Amino acid sequence: MTENTRALHDLREALTQPGCPVCRLVERDTGRYLDNLLWENVNDPGLRREIRRALGFCREHTRMLVSRPGASLGLALIARDVWGEIQRAMETSAFRPQDRRARSSVAPAAGLLARLTPQGECPACVHARALEDLYLDALLEKLVGEGGLLAAYQASDGLCLPHFRRALARARDGAACAALVGAQRAIGQRQLAELDEFIRKNDYRFRGEPWGRERDAWRRALGALVGEVGLSGGG
């Protein structure tokens, strides 16, 4: 199975689940990447160099790493590596707090600041962005036409706002772009109706009415704004 065929297969499945399908797949695949990093590649010199240049991982991916079972040793090695880099920068900096000139001006700290600024991006963010592009391109390529994803997309929660913007930026086919916008517009109308129903049923006059899909409309709507699988009900 080729990468594109696998991406299409995974998209079909993800479109049947709550929340943004691309968020769901990227979170899953990034988790696999982090597991592989911890258990197979934590001693890889090239990867360790990338991590040092980035001064570690971003907050989101650090949280994901910390949540992996048995991750403590691998993360200790990474943390030791990064903090060693930071400590070297501080100890070899021309800025010396005990120096009388340093106490009279903050200018010498500029060089230290530069060395304490990441020189690369979080490696997991780079990987996640490549995954986003893979799934969005597969969606756009297979959205319309025989056996396309349009019907499944129309029945789904659609893309979150960040991934919808990214899809529009990557769209090259007018028919696919028009179909995506039309489907997303209908999904948005459905979402607004569910929010209105949630708000209505919180009025004391209607609190006796049974709840339907609108029960978690507020959570799904927030998830769709920021691109959070967990918020949109699929975590």
Image: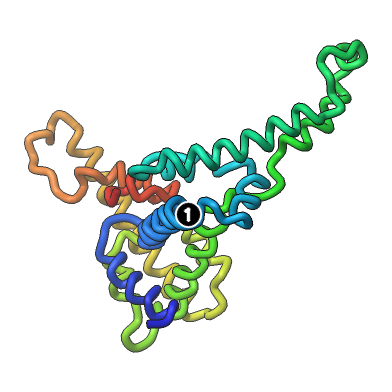
Structure colour scheme: rainbow
* Badge 1 amino acid: Leu
Q: Residues within 10 Å of mark 1 (few under 14, many from 20)?
A: some
User: Which quadrant: the N terminus?
Assistant: bottom left
Image position of 40 with respect to 51: above or below: below
Question: In x, y percent, where is residue 97?
Answer: 81, 15
Q: Which residue is mark 1?
A: 37
Q: Residue furthest right?
A: 101
Q: Nearer the viewer, residue 18 or 66?
A: 66
Using the rendered image of the protein, determine whether residue 215 is visible from the camera's viewpoint.
Answer: yes
Image position of 106 with respect to 152: above or below: above
Question: In x, y percent, where is residue 43?
Answer: 54, 52
Q: Nearer the viewer, residue 151 or 96?
A: 96
Image position of 93 with respect to 227: above or below: above
Residue at point 83%, 33% (across, down):
111
Question: In which image quadrant can residue 28 be found?
Answer: bottom left
Residue at point 45%, 57% (across, down):
40
Question: In x, y percent, where is residue 136?
Answer: 47, 69
Q: Nearer the viewer, residue 197 or 43?
A: 43
Question: In x, y percent, where is residue 30?
Answer: 44, 56
Image position of 56 with respect to 177: above or below: above
Question: In which image quadrant can residue 45 be found?
Answer: bottom right
Q: Is residue 33 left or right of residue 19?
A: right
Q: Is residue 206 left or right of residue 11?
A: left
Residue at point 21%, 47% (across, down):
214
Residue at point 25%, 49% (across, down):
194
SS at badge 1? helix
